[in-house]
Image: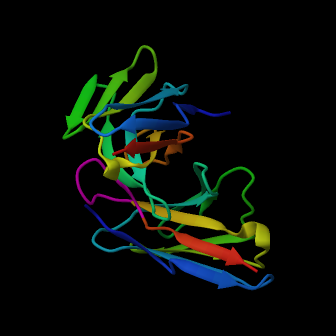
Amino acid sequence: GAVVSQHPSRVICKSGTSVKIECRSLDFQATTMFWYRQFPKQSLMLMATSNEGSKATYEQGVEKDKFLINHASLTLSTLTVTSAHPEDSSFYICSASGAADSGNTIYFGEGSWLTVV
Amino acid sequence: QQQVKQSPQSLIVQKGGISIINCAYENTAFDYFPWYQQFPGKGPALLIAIRPDVSEKKEGRFTISFNKSAKQFSLHIMDSQPGDSATYFCAASGAAGNKLTFGGGTRVLVKP
């Protein structure tokens, strides 16, 4: 199956700083990428949908100025958590959709653990 | 509004038994129903998916049953193994490749 890579897998940052998480589709062109947030023992919550070359579409209640999403190429999307606070600590997961095979299957990355101290 | 309801929240099954997870959806525009398996600290991995033009799909020990009129679908894991212990999520979208709406997840524990 197609591979979606996230980096870093774990990051610790100080409160008030910004942190960037990268999501790459390694063997296909991802026309659409999705960013999710997942708290322990809970389901995935969609934060935003990004299409290459256009502005991301944020879900209701997600602060677009705090969670900056850039999808500059067909293989890379980034999520920047700005002015991070401890409540932003979470597991962030990206997924990508493209014509890797028939059906435009959505593939997920391995996730990135963010801890804000 | 929770558009995809998943049950049970947790499930314990003996090795060799059958694990059954159920999902119900509300949005009749949903046209693609995948199941994902997630191990702790990892991203979800696609297990199997179905479209509403078929009532059942089987891949190895995993089977999806789909009831369009009832707006329900289920995952059956046959001959459950300890390695199947994970959290399973059903999901739905308007079409493959579109954004997914996830169920709440089911934590499955297979006892040896």
Q: Residue at x 31, y 40 (%)?
A: B15
Q: Is residue B55 visible?
A: yes
In the rendered image, which quarter contains the N terminus of chain A? bottom left
Q: Is the stretch drawn in magenta largely helix, strand or loop?
A: loop
Residue B18, compared with residue B88, is above or below; it is: above
Query: Which quarter of the figure has residue A63?
Result: bottom right
- Magenta range: A97-108
In the rendered image, which quarter contains the C terminus of chain A? bottom right
Q: Position of residue B14 (x, y in %)?
A: 35, 37
Q: Is residue A55 visible?
A: no
Query: Which quarter of the figure has residue A84?
Result: bottom right
Q: Residue at x 49, y 46 (%)?
A: B100
Asked whether B17 or A72 is in front, the reply is B17
Residue A97, compared with residue B71, is above or below; it is: below
Tell which residue pokes out farthest to the front in this image: B112
Tell which residue pokes out farthest to the top in this image: B69
Number of numbered discs overlaid on the protein picture: 0
Q: What's the colour scheme? A: rainbow
Asked whether B38 or B100 is in front, the reply is B38
Residue B110 forms part of the magenta stretch = no
Drawn side of residue B61 relative to residue B71, left or right: left
Q: Position of residue B9 (x, y in %)?
A: 55, 36
Residue B33, compared with residue B73, is above or below; it is: below
Q: Position of residue A85 (x, y in %)?
A: 79, 74
Q: Position of residue B71 (x, y in %)?
A: 46, 21
Residue A105 forms part of the magenta stretch = yes
Residue A111, compared with residue B110, is above or below; it is: below
